[in-house]
Amino acid sequence: MTVVGPFGLSVQDQALETDVREGMAAVEQALVEATKSDVPFITVGAQHLLYAGGKRFRPLLALLAAQFGDASAPGVVPAAVVVELTHLATLYHDDVMDEAAMRRGAVSANARWDNSIAILTGDFVFSRASRILADLGPEAVRLQSEAFERLVTGQILETVGPGPDEDPVRHYLEVLSGKTSSLVAVSCHLGALLAGADETVVEILTQFGERIGTAFQLADDVLDVASDSHESGKTPGTDLREGVPTLPVLLLRASEPDPSVPGDLRLRELTAGPLEDDALHAEALALLRAHPALAMARESTLRWSEEARALLGPLPECPAKTALEGLCDAVALRTM
């Protein structure tokens, strides 16, 4: 049997499929319980993004990492809940910072209510994650706090931007390492640790999480340019329209202007800032899709994915390892 989960993950083993299904159902129920309050309005706000959907990528990784130990250990599902609650809480704050009107196809909390309610709701969700985390022991608390520090640092670095003498591409990857990879890595770390996996296995899975987290974010960058479907969860070219410099545009800017490349100079002109005009946006999107910078972004994404796959080599052969290798394949498929 096969379960196709987030990002096209395919689980080819019936026992693992059952474990994943049951684990994710337990996580989902625990997320609902964790976001309830005695104040009905707070419950509505805290569950607003929960019910809007989401891929639940981080709890899934925690459950798969736990397969390398005792996957039924009592701390595994709570750890998966903690990392998803942390992720959800950051989304409330992100939408305020970005002045976003929509999130996951629904009206954002800040648009539905206001910025103050959205910020405080994010804080409430953080507090519930902390309450659950406290029962997992001091090591789990330390790991999660370190990951959260990295996440906030990444957000600050993104807000400040690269310094005048700093490589913008390197700065961008550092931002992704903090904002995205930190929480993906700790998902793997906590899942394996609380399942009692061997220390070496825990370290391998943590490093895998670092790389696959970056790979998936970079794949989103490619999809935002290359996809005509809505695989990325956003209208294609959203970042381009808003003037958000993701990897393809950063690689374009880092390269020397080349008049021999069709549209190169025009594309540089168009991508100097936001593209609110529909015609100019469509022109820039078409030019970027044909530009070597997009191919370079694909190559970079695949390098991160292959590094993640290579790390899995020493792990024992098992269905969970095969599923994690499948995530690496999914990166390749998403960027085609």
Image (cartoon, grey):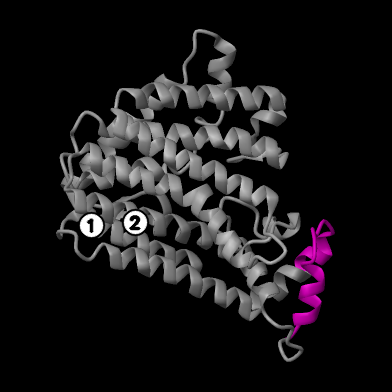
Q: Residue furthest front?
A: 165
Q: Is residue 263 magenta?
A: yes
Q: Nearer the viewer, mark 1 or mark 2?
A: 2
Q: Residue at x 32, y 46 (%)?
A: 188
Residue 220 picture location, percent across and down: 54, 58
Q: Please tell me whether residue 106 is drawn above or below residue 297 in the rendered image.
A: above
Left or right: 318 as drawn, with respect to 11: left
Q: In the image shown, does 35 or 137 lie closer to the viewer?
A: 137
Magenta residues (range):
262-282
Q: CA distance from mark 1 to mark 2?
A: 14 Å
208 left or right of 256 in image: left
> What is the three-letter code of the residue carrying label 2?
Gln
Q: Which residue is under mark 2?
A: 207
Identify residue type, mark 1.
Lys
Q: For the residue labelled by badge 2, is the local secondary structure a helix, a strand or a loop?
A: helix
Residue 141 shows in this picture: yes
Q: Callout 2: 10 Å neighbours few (<14), some, many (20+)?
A: many
Check if residue 241 falls in the magenta segment: no
Whether residue 322 sits left or right of residue 183 in the image: it is left
Residue 53: give x, y in percent of width and height. 50, 37
Q: Choose top left, top right, bottom left or bottom right for residue 312.
A: bottom left
Residue 321 circle label? 1
Where is residue 31 drawn, in percent x and y?
41, 27
